[in-house]
Image (cartoon, grey):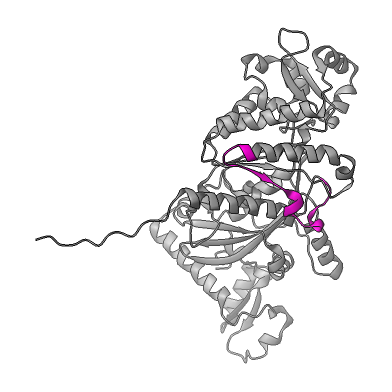
Amino acid sequence: MIQRMGLRAENVLFLDDNHLNLEEAQFFNTGLMVEMGDRDLSGLLNLPQLQGKDDRSHSRLAQYKVMEQKQAEQTDAGLSNTEFLAQSGIKIKIITDIENHMDRVLEILNRTNQLNFTKVRANTKNERAALEDLLNVSGVHAGLVHVQDRYGDYGIVGFFCVRTKFSGTTVHHLAFSCRTLNMGVEQWVWEYLHEPDFKEVGPVANPIKTFDKVDWITEVQSFAEADTDAEQRRLCLVGGCDLLQVSFYCGTNRDEFVNKQDDNGMLVRFDDVGFFINPRDMRLKHLKEQRDFVGYTLDEMKALDQSLAESDLILLSMFFSIPSDLLFTYGGDEFGGKYWGTIPPRRFKKLMRDHNTAMRFAKGMFHRRLSLEDRLALTRQCFVHADRLRRKEAPLFILGSATEHGQQAERTRDMRIAFNDMCREFCGTTPNAHFINVDGLLDAEEFADSDHYTRTGYFKIADFVNKQTKALAQVRTPAPQPRERETAVS
């Protein structure tokens, strides 16, 4: 019974009027609290062990009744656990409005144990302040996990908080209520976060990866409307770290071409003009300069083209392609090279540390010093490439650069203004292309620095994209006209 209810023995009080039953139950369940049921029990509710949150509506009892019904139905049907889960219709809604649910966040962090994989609490004033500070750090993604299935509503059962950078994802909090134990919810969330490496803090009821793959859970934006357009659409996102945050709020069916580490631990960036405009030649597949110095592959370039052609929404963040002085050409039969590539400064420094690599780089890569106008023109070609491949009904969003916030913006303001002007001009002359003006969209406190935003800032960008996309869909789909009344003809 304890196992089926997802509890630990030390959190259970067992009542019985037979002392032998009490002793047997306690023998097989270490830590179980017991009490003779034929005594006056009126004082039990005053015990500190039985203090919990007010649940006069008996919501927890209702949840246990759901679990009991599920157990009985699975037993009667003779289904395995995964077969039973596959027919349960489990749906998850990720709630990103953390501030209005902070009481539940604290309850999950401080009261859950069996499925709390990080065990980082927020009991004290300092711990709560540290949590609030963490939630405001750039690159942090946090969410509450609300679960329903065809048996009932389990409420908000989990909380996660991670920080994602090109070098990987740091898991700060990953905790779940035991009421969804054995449903695969915690593994689904881990997979949703791209399976980050982290050290589980035991004891836990089961490891984070219990099943081969959790494919019986569906993410929804609303439990009332399970098959909304937002859940069905496919997204293509290209850019820097900022899009890793925006993408979480835009949908689950997405192709992300964002900063990553290659097998040698060096940075690979996809917000590079060469990733868009280079010819898709088979020669690139075996070109050492492409593989060793630039980083991204011909297969990834082809994947971009396929994603641009098939996606329902495209979001590009390409400002990085403008300020870098490390722009090169390489390959081809002519002197000077045929293909374009921008080497990230961190990658360039690592390449130059090895003498032999540096010599090969000098022989194969041709440095190109271009004017701002020429660099803007190259980046505009990237937008043209995306526009040429996309379906006309798929909106193209281009993220602008901050010009008024942070030291970087002050130092490169003219460049940023020129980039934004070029983006506005392109969007103004291209059907169904939309410029995202971050200066006008975000408040000052939502800029972590010139190129990164707080969690609420990323949410605002995603919200702008979602609302614009919904409005465009409504324009394309006219309201149904009332049917004319049919008249009988004799």
Q: Quadrant of residue 360?
A: top right
Q: Residue at x 80, y 69 (%)?
A: 123
**Any part of residue 473 in sight:** yes
Residue pictured at 81% horizontal, 66% vertical: 128
Q: Which residues are magenta?
A: 428-450
Outermost left residue: 490
Image quadrant in which the C terminus is located: bottom left
Judge from the rendering whether residue 15 lies leftward or rightward of residue 366; answer left or right: left
**Horizontal and vertical percent for residue 194?**
66, 44
Image point (78%, 22%), residue name: 293
**x and y percent of residue 248 in the render?**
65, 49
Q: Nearer the viewer, residue 485 or 178?
A: 485
Q: Is residue 409 left or right of residue 479?
A: right
Placement of 154 over or under 391, stated as above or below? below
> Quick check: can you spot residue 171?
no
Eyeballing the image, is 77 above or below 335?
Answer: below
